[in-house]
Amino acid sequence: MTTTSLEPENTVNKRYVKALRSSVKHIVTFALIIGLWEILGQNGQLNKYILPWPSLIWAQLVDLFFISGIIYYHFYTTLAEATIGFFIGITIGISLAVSAAFSPVFRRYIAPYAVIFSVTPGIAVTPMIIAWFGFGWSSKIALAALVCFFPPFVNTLTALTRTDEDGSDLFRSMGASKRDYFWKLQFPNAIPMIVAGLKLALTGALLGTIVAEFVSATAGVGILMQRFAFKLQIDGSFATLLTMSAMGLMLFTIMEILDYKVVFWKRDSRLLSVSRKRAAKWRRDHGNIPM
Amino acid sequence: MTAETSEVTYVPDRENTWRFVPKHFAIFLVLMSVWELANRMGLADPLMFPRPTRIAEGMLQIFFLKATVWEHLAATFAKAMGGFIIGTAIGMGLAIGAALHTGFRDYLKPYIILVEAMPRIAVGPIFVGWLGFGYGSAIALAALVCFFGPFVNTMTGLMQIDEESEELFRSCRASKKQIFFKLMVPNAMPLISAGLKLAAAGAFAGALVAEFIQADVGLGVMMRRYVITLNMDYAFSTLLSITVFAFVLFRSIEIMNYRIIYWHSEELMQRKSKRRASEFAGIINKQVSGTGGQ
Amino acid sequence: MSDSLQEAGEAVSKPSATNSDVVIEANALTKAFSEEVIALQGASFKINEGDFISLVGPSGCGKSTLLRLVAGLIEKTSGSVKVRENEVTEPRTDIGMMFQKPVLLEWRTAVENVLLPSELTGKITDEDRSRAIQALHLVGLKDFEFHFPRQLSGGMQQRVALARLLQTGADILLLDEPFGALDEFTRERLNIELMNIVDGTATTSLFVTHNIAEAIFLADEVMVMTPRPGKLARIVEVPFERPRSLELQLTPEFNKIESEVRNILGSYV
């Protein structure tokens, strides 16, 4: 229990200085690791077919992005496949979950299949998906959708079937319809878990796409990676891996931003700005009401 | 670094499920019959969607008559297990370091964020390139894929002790070691075991993907071969064996977790209470008779 | 009137007490968490052996900080705090603590929780074990020795914590709103039980609360604290005989002290 006072300006400045100092520390460490790695490579301590050093990887990156420029085609293919698969998967997952949440009978009869689904790794069906949908983009989308459908399904179902007796009593005491109860209480309450499910799903979609590309494909970062690896151009593989990581980071960040924006009430840092916005809106819309 | 603490497994109400077993079974039979009939009537391509009886026959073949599945099952199990052990050891080791040492945690953080966002399975071809088609590459990939769950969960678990508990221990002059083993570790156990469950799923998936890419033995190879030769009934049987295997693996981990975190189960607590009471009774009786003799 | 109300800042002690009876002594004790956040400023007081002292004040007045400084859990910024004439620099074995939360290890049975202090200071002996069982009986938990915390109610969990405090063998008890999270009835009962346990022993207690009536009812002296920055405003003596009963709270004398304390706090709350 300490005396809490509002934070004065200068501690905010101090915090920035501290953050800057710590990032400098990180950059220096990173530079040291890269430098050491490079020196070992240049001195012939490393085998370029096993662990290529930073300058080789950098050269491959430059080639992929600026000289030959072949990465773009593969990058966009994978990105498109993963995104479409993601939307199909989550649409199916969430609609199934909502139906299951509203119909106990339906919920009961899909339960055993859901258990089976939850334990089988989705990517295990990759070869079959390829056989069914061919080597093109449709098989990638199908696998992405399959892999990413489950987390939103489980999370949505769990969140919607969580019993909140007080909340339900309150809504009934106010004469709310079932629909009001769903849209004004159940659903908003479920949003944090649904978003968490979507985050997992997006990672899954990218993973499914890449694995499908490994097994059989004509385009995509997965196949590019595999070609490099099998030609023992490990520097190229590393460059592709970095590109994939960037793609993952990008998608991941989008989901984090979504989470940050949508689930504002779980974050203290967001509450102040949202409440200011709402206050401004109130004043704009209802300025005539005395306060 | 968001802790992936939610487990994505579906836990139905057990009692309810059992009560409806006959109905479930009936529905399953109807579904299968429709599938079978559709196949026989030529409504579904038997090459792509083999009929249930053929899949059942395939199961019989690969498990008992030809008994081909065992070798592959053992291989995949060994790869997944090896990867699981290595990945978990690395993940938990790093997590302990990060939880106990703020500086180390600071340095680790950016790399962890990168590794989290990276599709880790994508490293598969590089591992296959380095380590060949055998066990090495699959174990490495399984380890890489599965290390993250135990890492995040162990770290989060170790760090989530509340201030008062720590103050209680310190006020009793507990050593750092005592705080770690008697407070932090048991307190983290529920999260750690959830992490292990995630890791098992990851290791299995990692091993399978490595086998899809290139391998000489394993369920992934088996399945891929059947698909390529368009032996879809056997491919389905293999998929079914993968499911069975995964189910057994998961259930064993769940049972293990249930036993380890006994203080979350009313039934186990009651049993343990009784056992500890009887252990204690001996000591107390001895003590009481000892003082009584004075 | 002027006897029972004394200015803090100047150290207070009972006239009869000799210096050797003083167990806790603080002089201009100050704790600042940063330049801006001063949790406790210049607290001076003396507590004699066997006294029951309540620390009362609103949130953020530094009660818990003061307690943790005495316990040696946090470091002071300036001033001094001595226990038995030794400057406090680390937790001591003659000090035991109890918190608002029971802080039980939920993977251990009640008796194993009570045994924790013994376990942390050495190997558990059979004597420790029988003392733990006795402590549990004393706090009214016979037949619950082997229950796990999750199987006990909030009040029972706090009783286990009390038994664990007794098990430490400490004769200085630092209690940080120990029953604050319980319902009114349970709280009153536990207060009385605590008083019965401590009464007539040489145990010195420092009891933090934000409930004025509770503070007065339990204590020989009430230290009244005020916030922003946390300061020890006054020490009010409570002259009632022991043992006390709940009816005491209805007497005019009790109400007089209560309104005194309220007046001191009034300008801050």
Image (cartoon, coloured by chain):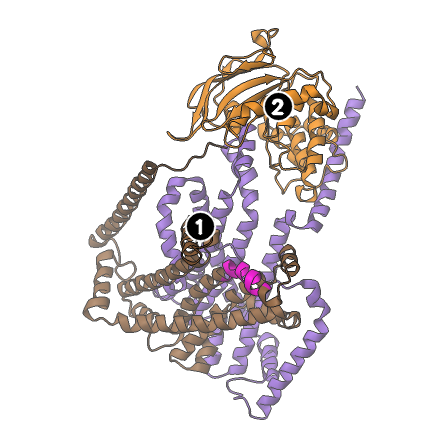
State the SS at label 2. helix
Label 1 residue SS: helix
Magenta span main SS: helix
For residue B127, say whether it is visible.
no
x, y percent for residue A22: 31, 42
Task: Residue at 61%, 39% (x, y): give it.
Answer: C105
Q: In front here: A227 or A116? A: A116
Give the side of residue A281 with respect to residue B167, left or right.
left
Q: Is residue C111 rendered to the left or right of residue B210? A: right
The stretch in magenta equals A181-194
Callout 1 and callout 2 share a chain: no
Circle 1 chain: A
Quadrant hosting residue C20? top right
For the N terminus of chain C, which image quadrant?
A: top right
Three-letter residue code for mark 1: Leu
Q: How far apart are marks 1 and 2 (CA)?
A: 40 Å
Residue carrying label 2: C259
Q: Tell me the residue at 33%/78% (across/down).
A: A218
Q: Chain A is drawn in which colour?
A: brown
Which chain is displayed in purple in the rendered image?
B
Query: What amino acid is at disc 2?
Result: Ser
Q: Residue at x 38, y 56 (%)?
A: B115
Asked if residue C222 is positioned above or below residue A127 in the image, the reply reads: above
Read off the residue under disc 1.
A271
> Can residue C64 be seen in the rendering of this structure?
yes
Colour assignment, chain C:
orange
**Mark 2 packing: few (<14 Cα in 10 Å), some, or many (20+)?**
some
The foreground one among C12 and B127 is: C12
